[in-house]
Amino acid sequence: MKIKIINPNTTWSMTEDIETAGKRYARNGTEVYAVSPATGPESIESMYDESLAIPGVLSEIIKGDREEGADAFIIACFGDPGLLAAKEVTEKPVIGIAQAAFITAKMIAPNFSVVYVLDRSEQVVRDVVRLHGMEQFCRSCRSTGLGVLDFDRDREAGLRALADQGRRCVEEDGAECVILGCAGFVQFVDALRKELGVPVIDGVSPAVKLCEVLVDMDCKTAKRNLWSNPEPKEILGLSDIVKF
């Protein structure tokens, strides 16, 4: 089995951390590899960033489907950018890390909170909670006040910020599970579980396990109507990137 993880931003140090997390719980015999697209922002913290990242995400899914023999795909950004469009360009399973985190949290806890990056990213987080129908289970969304790349530059400060906001989620908001709202937070999962005393979930690891299950069951993406293949057409300036 071959699972391709797409980190929609172009920061390769983060992509490497994501690949390490993806491989951690994969079965023997499952190949997990992570890439960053050739086009896109260095970090994703706003709706603007998300929009600019989507063509690169679609390009990597098309390439994985047609050229690399990938069996399933993971979009490793908590806003799940391009997730619904990605389901149109392949019949193979495509999972977003927010989607995977929410599904997993609901199996082990009655509610959850999300800890994410900058204050301005709140709408991105709330939109993806709404996209997956999880509003009634989400106790709170709390910002660390740090940018995505800040966690790469100073990991100790990043861990402190996550622990502080995670503690507030548990003690003030009543969260019984904390979801990490950025793919770059995968490096902090173990430390935060010890610190907070509740389940702490990143989206990458459960996404890998969900991909394995779906491929094992030979589950394909529905293609009857909504997620049927897009009609071929010329897209000025992008046809070489997302040629279908």
Image (cartoon, rainbow, N blue to C red):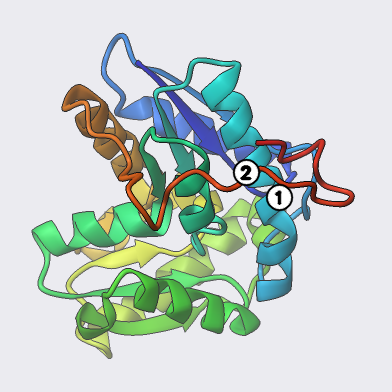
Q: What residue appears at the point 60 percent right and 32 percent down from the top-left corner?
A: 62
Query: Considering only vertical position in the picture, is 169 above or below 2?
Result: below
Amino acid type shown at disc 2: Leu
- Residue 190 image point, x, y percent: 34, 46
Q: Dot 1: within a 10 Å radius of its alpha carbon, few (fewer than 14), some, or many (20 or more) residues?
A: many
Image quadrant holding the N terminus, namely: top left
Q: CA distance from mark 2 to mark 1?
A: 5 Å
**Marking on residue 58:** 2
Q: Secondary structure at mark 2?
A: helix
The residue lying furthest to the top in this view is 29
Asked if disc 2 and disc 1 are in contact, CB closer than 8 Å, the reply is yes
Query: How many discs mark residues in the rendered view?
Result: 2
- Residue 78 image point, x, y percent: 49, 60
- Residue 117 image point, x, y percent: 58, 71
Amino acid type shown at disc 1: Pro
Q: Dot 2: within a 10 Å radius of its alpha carbon, few (fewer than 14), some, or many (20 or more) residues?
A: many
Q: What residue appears at the point 41 percent right and 68 percent down from the top-left corner?
A: 163
The residue lying furthest to the right in this view is 237
Horizontal side of residue 209 vs 50, given as left or right: left
| Quadrant of the image occupied by residue 196 | bottom left
Horizontal side of residue 222 vs 199, given as left or right: right
Horizontal side of residue 191 vs 119, given as left or right: left
User: Residue 235 versus residue 73: which sits nearer the camera?
Assistant: 235
Residue that numbered label 1 is attached to: 55
Q: What residue appears at the point 29 percent right and 43 percent down from the top-left corner?
A: 206
Q: What residue appears at the point 10 percent right and 73 percent down from the top-left corner?
A: 110
User: Residue 66 versus residue 224: which sits nearer the camera?
Assistant: 224
Query: Considering only vertical position in the picture, is 232 above or below 85?
Result: above
